Amino acid sequence: MIAPELTQCILCPRKCRADRTKNKGFCGAGKQIRLARAALHFWEEPCISGTNGSGAVFFSGCNLKCCFCQNASISSQNFGAVITQNRLAEIFLELQEQGAHNINLVTAGHYLPQIIPVLEKTKPELRIPVIYNTSSYESVENLKKLDGLIDIYLPDFKFFSSETAKKYANAPDYPEIAEKAIREMLQQTGEPVFKEDLLKTGCIIRHLVMPGHRQESIRLLHYLAENLNRGQFLLSLMAQYTPMQNSVYPELNRRITKMEYQSVLRTAQELNFSGYSQDKSSSNYEYTPDFNLEGVLR
Ligand code: SF4
């Protein structure tokens, strides 16, 4: 069944009003779900990947399309295969059977009208948490529909400056939208709850330190410390920025330096955030899985 909101789509802050029953929107999504990969994934935070891996379901397309995206084959080039809602339900249960510690919906926002009925149907059979892994360029209205269906949020806070968000993602409203979206996520999950070493409910705010932007990262951390309750979320400071191709922005054509990462990490420590950091040597290609339809088709 085609969701009525898809005929003039305003699901996300792009509000591109595409008729997705006939065409694709800015995000690349049409009326049917497209997936690029559904498999165990070992490169999330330790409390998400655990020993067995996270059951990562990578959706095709993206409404943000950062110019430095490390998953460009799915975010911009829209690689993937069309699947039915029944198949998505099967995939969730298959990942659970494979021993996944959770079901990890990666960049799923543009498919929420199709995904929500699947979550409602499968949730009673899932013994593991469901994760919503997002750029945070999401409307609060959409996120409210996930209340009770999502156990863990993994929101990025990518840009603190509107100028940077405009330059790299053509989304000058990103900082404001992301803050509102993250506040809604925190409202839904409450404080992080662990069972043994695995996160059961909660929110991990992720921030990727980018070359030439450490001062912006430091300003973001101060803002989060002053405006959000640090006990309500974990912070994950990522060092894995990897230049994928020759960018039109020369400053993006290198990895971050040790000094850049250490200065941001030191700020996080001084501000007493709880959470995760990455070894600087983690900036490599391992974090980008092969998008080869593994686990997608029957
Ligand atoms: S979800 Fe996609 S089609 Fe809908 S408004 Fe956003 S970018 Fe446009």
Image: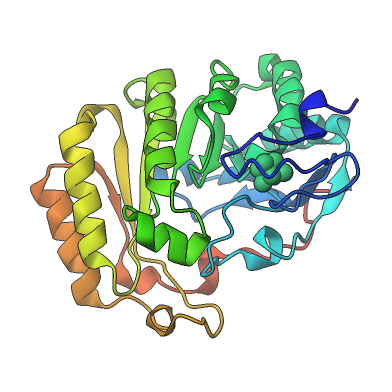
**In the figure, 274 relative to 244: above or below?**
above
Left or right of 49: which side holds 214?
A: left
Residue found 30% across the figure and 70% down from its top:
280
- Quadrant location, the C terminus: top right
Number of callouts in the render?
A: 0
Residue found 36% across the figure and 42% down from its top:
205
Residue found 42% across the figure and 78% down from its top:
252
Picture coordinates of residue 4, whole percent (x, y): 82, 25
- Asked if one can make out residue 173 in the rendered structure from this viewpoint, the answer is yes
Occupied quadrant, residue 121? top right
Residue found 53% across the figure and 32% down from its top:
139
Q: Quadrant of ligand 1?
A: top right
Left or right of 202: which side holds 49?
A: right
**In the figure, 118 relative to 240: above or below?**
above
- The image's colouring method is rainbow
Occupied quadrant, residue 200? top left
User: Which is more toward the observer, 292 or 81?
Assistant: 81
Picture coordinates of residue 286, whole percent (x, y): 53, 69
**In the figure, 49 relative to 209: above or below?**
above
User: Which is more toward the observer, 266 or 31?
Assistant: 31
- Quadrant location, the N terminus: top right
Picture coordinates of residue 13, whole percent (x, y): 56, 40
Left or right of 93: which side holds 84?
A: right
User: Which is more toward the observer, 106 or 175?
Assistant: 175
Residue located farthest toward the left when viewing the structure as drawn? 270
Picture coordinates of residue 161, whole percent (x, y): 32, 56
- Asked if one can make out residue 98 in the rendered structure from this viewpoint, the answer is no
